[in-house]
Each structure stands twice: as structure tokens, then as C-alpha cells.
Amino acid sequence: MKTLMIATMLSVAATTSAFAQTAPAQGSTPQPYAAQADANTTAVQNGAWVPPDGQAIAPKTRAQVYQELVQAEQDGQLAYLNSTVYAHP
């Protein structure tokens, strides 16, 4: 019983340390896609996701999302997805 308890504790300790983040070296700041971004981009918080083109993506309103849904229904995109991607064999 003690052996099982010790083995469990060791495995938990080993897996939790595997997921620990390492701190960046002194003086270096991580800049995702910084080489591709131009000087006109806004500052991003450290660790925040940056789109590949370096530009911030504006959120959509409910009305815009609903309009896209209506457009997808009208031009057949939803029917195509339902018949291919979401079809159950």
C-alpha cells in the first residue's frame, strides 16, 4: 500500500513539473511574429496571442454574425457543410 502511495506521489510530481513554464532569459522579451509585424501595430501584452499578420482582429457584433449566418444559408454553405463535414455515416 505504501509503495503504491509513493509511486503515485512520484508520478504526480513528475508530471506537474513537466508542465511548468520556464522564464525567459534576463533582458530578452518574447515577441511573437515581431519580425513580420510593421511599426504601425499596437503594443501587445506579454504572452498574448498575436495573429500571423500582426494586426489586431476587431470583434464582431451579434448583428454581423447573424448576417453571416443568413448569407451562408442563402448561398448553400451550410447545406454543403451539413452534407459533408457533419454527415453521420
Image (spheres, rainbow, N blue to C red):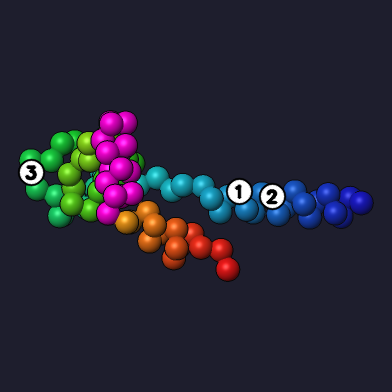
Distance from Cα at disc 2 to Cα at disc 3: 45 Å
Query: What secondary structure characterizes most of the magenta part?
Result: helix
> Visible in this render: residue 67?
yes
Q: Amino acid at mark 3?
A: Ala
Q: Position of residue 75 (x, y in %)?
A: 27, 54
Is residue 32 at least partly visible in the picture?
no
Query: Which residue is labeled 2 in the image?
Result: 12
Q: Residue at x 39, y 57 (%)?
A: 79
Give amino acid for label 1: Thr
Residue 75 horizontal side relative to residue 85, left or right: left
Comparing 51 with 63, the one in front is 63
The residue where tag 3 is placed is 39
Residue at image location 51% in from the left, 63% down from the top: 87
Of badges 1 and 3, nearer the viewer stands: 3
Q: Farthest left residue?
A: 39
Marks 1 and 3 sit apart, C-alpha to C-alpha, by 39 Å
Residue 33 is covered by the magenta coloring:
no
The amino acid beneath tag 2 is: Val
Q: Quadrant of residue 89?
A: bottom right
Q: Which residue is mark 1?
A: 16
Position in image of residue 9 (x %, y %):
75, 48
Residue count near mark 3 (Cα–Cα under 10 Å), binned few <14, some 14–19, many ≥20: few
* Left or right: 14, with 8 as reference point: left
Left or right of 68: which side holds 38?
Answer: left
- Callout 1 secondary element: helix
Q: CA distance from mark 1 to mark 2?
A: 6 Å
Which residue is farthest bottom? 89
Residue bounds of the magenta highlight: 61-75
Dividing the picture into quarters, in which one does residue 83 lie? Answer: bottom left
Marks 1 and 2 close (CB-CB < 8 Å): yes
Taking 2 as reference, is 45 above or below it?
Answer: above
